[in-house]
Image (cartoon, helix red, strand yellow):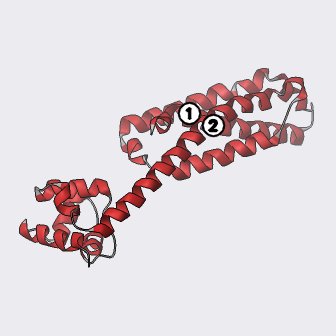
Amino acid sequence: MGDLANKLKRYRAKKGLTQAALAEKLSISRKTVSSWENGHSFPKFSTIIQLSKVFGIKVDDLLKGDEKVIEHFNKQDKQVRKDKRILKVCYYLNTFLLILSYVNMFKPFGFHSSLISLTLIGNMIIFFSQYSNWKLFKKKEQLTRLVIGFFLFLFLNSTTMIFNVSFQRTLVPGDAIAIIGASSGEFTLILFITISWTLAVFFRSAKKNK
């Protein structure tokens, strides 16, 4: 058992808190606190800061002397920096692919490549799998903006079907199956473009991470 585990037990007892009471203050489960105190896992650094406030001590008082914990946070910091770089690259790549998707939609000079759509989808999957600041959207105001923005982008992008000459040419008069097929394909592309716009507008904070 490391020094941090022992310190957590000692400071918790000094404050007269049970594991359940401490867990409630941190909005976590009692099992998580138990895991820390048994040395099976470590708190996140943001939680370490919360713990220092609950115990009325400095962060250094918890971390000092435990090389294993310091090494853990150094590795964690490197991983966080790596994830932020990936997010930043994906964000800018999304902007580039978004522009290409409109080219793909209107097919100027007959240009068309399904690879653009596939790359856009793959890039968005990577972005959302790496994105961690979901608590931002727990705020009702921010979530409302996201939902309204998504449907606004969806509506505006859907109007392109009306004046997209390239799409109109694929519609065969009297052939309902062909019309449904072409419309479904076009709307699917529009849906992905809409998600891409939503990412670009409401997740732009990702590009600011250093």
Q: Nearer the viewer, residue 53 or 18?
A: 53
The residue positioned 17% from the left and 56% from the top of the image is 52
Q: Residue 143: in sight, yes or no?
A: yes
Based on the displayed image, in which of its 4 quarters is residue 55 positioned?
bottom left
Secondary structure at badge 2 equals helix
Secondary structure at badge 1 equals helix
What is the crowding at mark 1: few (fewer than 14 residues within 10 Å), some, or many (at least 20)? some
- Amino acid type of the residue that numbered disc 1 sits on in the rendered structure: Ala
Q: Residue 166 vs residue 122: left or right?
A: right
Q: Nearer the viewer, residue 93 or 144?
A: 93
Numbered tag placed on residue 200 in the rendering: 1
Q: Position of residue 27 (x, y in %)?
A: 26, 59
Q: Mark 2 or mark 1, which is nearer the start of the sequence?
A: 2
Q: Which residue is mark 2?
A: 94
- Residue 27 position (above or below residue 115): below
Q: Nearer the viewer, residue 153 or 54?
A: 54
Q: Position of residue 129 (x, y in %)?
A: 55, 53
**Quadrant in which the C terminus appears:** top left
Q: Residue 131: in sight, yes or no?
A: no
The residue positioned 83% from the left and 42% from the top of the image is 181
Q: Mark 1 near mark 2, Cβ–Cβ under 8 Å?
A: yes
| Marks 1 and 2, how far apart at CA | 7 Å
The residue positioned 76% from the left and 39% from the top of the image is 116
Q: Residue 25 vs residue 47: left or right?
A: left
Q: Position of residue 207 (x, y in %)?
A: 50, 36
